């Protein structure tokens, strides 16, 4: 890891800025974290940058590693989906819309990020949304 940090220091500022812009665009405009194939390898293919450099850039820009950031962004996506959902929205719809391959991964991430299980999370999100009168 020390070696990677040293390489990161020697990359020109313009290359760092370009990579930061590209990652920001992919994450915040293209919402690539919702793609089923989203991974460090996926970002490497999209940006042409090394996976370790991408992770260092994410830590620098978002103060979170790739995995922490992915979890946070997917759970934020889930929050938005739950608030907009109708009664007949299925768990599989949530999974696919937020980029999860399986239920266990979503439940684990939800517990880590919020401390709630899925049912508690849905009740809390809908209750909060109803109390403030719409989108939170």
Image (cartoon, rainbow, N blue to C red):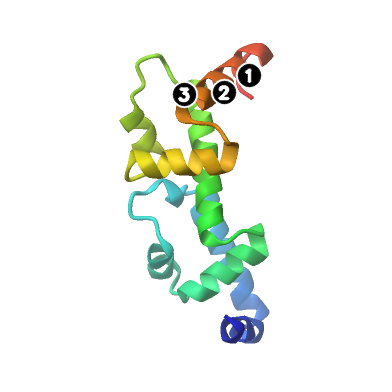
Can residue 25 be seen by looking at this rendering? no
Residue occupying image coordinates x 35% and y 28%: 91
* Distance between mark 2 and mark 3 Cα atoms: 10 Å
Number of numbered callouts drawn: 3
Q: Residues within 10 Å of mark 1 (few under 14, many from 20)?
A: some
Secondary element at tag 1:
helix
Nearer-the-camera pick, 80 or 15: 80
Q: Position of residue 104 (x, y in %)?
A: 37, 41
Q: Residues within 10 Å of mark 3 (few under 14, many from 20)?
A: few
Foreground tag (2 vs 3)? 3
Nearer-the-camera pick, 56 or 121: 121
Residue occupied by mark 3: 119
Can residue 13 be seen by looking at this rendering? yes
Q: Position of residue 110 (x, y in %)?
A: 50, 38
Quadrant including the N terminus: bottom right
Tell me if label 2 and label 3 are in contact, CB under 8 Å: no
Q: Position of residue 102 (x, y in %)?
A: 32, 42
In the depicted structure, whether residue 66 falls above or below residue 16: above
Q: Position of residue 51 (x, y in %)?
A: 46, 72
Foreground tag (3 vs 1)? 3
* Sequence-first tag of 2 and 3: 3
* Distance between mark 3 and mark 1 Cα atoms: 14 Å
Quadrant of res 136: top right
In the depicted structure, whether residue 62 falls above or below residue 120: below
Secondary element at tag 2:
helix
The dot on residue 29 is none
The dot on residue 128 is 1
* Sequence-first tag of 3 and 1: 3
Nearer-the-camera pick, 124 or 133: 124
Residue occupied by mark 2: 125
Residue occupying image coordinates x 66% and y 12%: 131
Tell me if label 2 and label 1 are in contact, CB under 8 Å: yes
């Amino acid at each position: 890891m020390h070696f990677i940090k040293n390489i990161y220091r020697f990359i020109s500022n313009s290359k760092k800025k370009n990579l930061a812009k590209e990652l920001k665009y992919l994450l915040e405009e293209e919402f690539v974290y919702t793609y089923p194939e989203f991974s460090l390898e996926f970002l490497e293919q999209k940006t042409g940058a090394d996976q370790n450099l991408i992770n260092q850039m994410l830590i620098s820009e978002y103060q979170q590693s790739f995995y922490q950031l992915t979890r946070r962004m997917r759970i934020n996506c889930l929050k938005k989906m739950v608030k907009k959902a109708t009664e007949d929205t299925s768990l599989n719809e949530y999974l696919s819309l937020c980029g999860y391959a399986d239920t266990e991964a979503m439940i684990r991430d939800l517990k880590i990020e919020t401390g709630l299980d899925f049912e508690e999370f849905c009740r809390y999100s809908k209750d909060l949304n109803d109390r403030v009168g719409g989108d939170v």
